[in-house]
Amino acid sequence: MIGLPLQIGPIRLRTNLLLAPIAGYCDLAFRTICREQGGLGMACTDLLSPQGLLRGTATSLDLAKTDATDKPVCMQLYGSDPEIMAEGARWAVEHGATVIDINMGCPVDKVTKKDGGSKLLTDLPRAARIAERVARELEKTPLDRDEWARRIGDAQLIAPGSAPIPVPLTCKMRLCWHDADYAAGNACSPGLARMLADAGVAAVTVHGRTTEMKFSGEVIHDGIARVVETIGGRIPIVGNGDVREPADALRMIERTGCQGVMIGRGALSTPWIFRDCWSLQTTGAVEEAPGIPRIIEIIRRYFELMRVQRDDRYALFQINRRVSWFAKRLTGTDAAGKPIGVKPFKEAVRSARSAGDVHFALDRFAAGGLRGGFFELQESATT
């Protein structure tokens, strides 16, 4: 609903906006900078392998890393074995999760070939069994009020009495696997959402595309609306897909009737999109966009967080692959009306061999350099 906080089970978020579990991008550092801009109700981790968590593999543990400021946080699990998924959910509860989510929407081959992600849309009984098994496991591991206070962040716990409360379970899905099924009116998502509600799931996110569409074409609002209509208010439905500007979030709610909006790729270039989406819903206006100096400081903040949370080598790797996303909001015109080109800036960041080189490039761009045509970094700021 427009301007109303989203409630997931016993948890009332500060807003109705969520950061999606974007594979390869939703690390702790990125979640942190999104939170710092405001408007974010809850952030999700990257996709987590329960087997990796249970074995303690370095990659899985890094993807699940959280801290005291990263609350409320949803940990998303993917897989197809109900018992392993239940064990993974228990691990996530024991390691700080505010919400557990089951991935039923990832279209990537390495996930679907193992019968996880959106492959579950082709086997609804299995999808329901997984959800029911995980929900029962969560009921065995409830949290007392003191523990909830430590992991709820700026959300509220809405539950009577003093008894321990289980961590809520959510699921994220797509409309269906095949385009033809959706076109024929046979999308599985409305029925699956009903089955998941019966199994104890507290909320469902629907990405408005089929698996075959992957990330092409336009989000299908009508498909999300069908799920909302079918579920009839039993649990909240969160809409996802193609939210790149504040007006897109408003349009998602108006066209689908969903109670919340999950934003993925739109946040990669605009970490302050949650602030703007919430402002538009609650005040009817969008705050002034950050200027170049502020955007540069956001990029710098992300880079420094990566250095602290991992190391310089990993931070350099991440800033190299993300600078194109960040730079999308640096284009335009300067105060004199002159076009701002970012190619030299991106080249300087990608050629950086040290943290000092990255900071040097950020400083140069903020000062008006590294713009326009071809530029080769001739000065070294290596430290």
Image: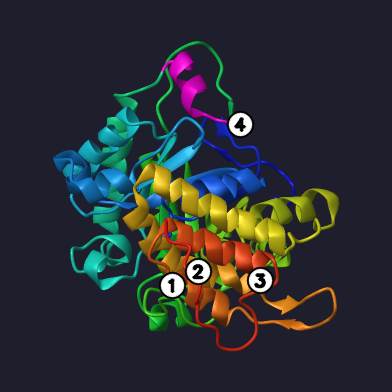
> Which residue has dot 3 on it?
330
Question: Which of the two marks, 1 or 4, is nearer to us in this view?
Answer: 1
> Which residue has dot 1 on it?
350
Residue 171 rendering spot, x and y as whole percentages: 41, 50
* Disc 3 from disc 4: Cα separation: 31 Å
Q: Tags 1 and 4 in contact by the CB under 8 Å rule? A: no
Name the outermost residue toward the bottom.
373
Q: Could you say which disc has been placed on residue 49 in the image?
A: none
Residue 5 rendering spot, x and y as whole percentages: 67, 41
Please state the extent of the stretch shown in magenta in the rendering: 144-154
Q: Amino acid at mark 1?
A: Arg
Is disc 3 surrounded by few (<14), some (14 to 19) or many (20+) residues within 10 Å?
many
Is disc 1 surrounded by few (<14), some (14 to 19) or many (20+) residues within 10 Å?
many
The residue depicted at 70 percent of the width and 71 percent of the height is: 368
Which comes sooner in the sequence, label 1 or label 4? 4
> Which residue has dot 4 on it?
154
Q: Tags 1 and 2 in contact by the CB under 8 Å rule? A: yes
Residue 124 rendering spot, x and y as whole percentages: 30, 59
Name the outermost residue toward the front.
379
Magenta stretch prevailing secondary structure: helix
Q: Could you say which disc has been placed on residue 323 in the image?
A: 2
Q: Amino acid at mark 4?
A: Asp
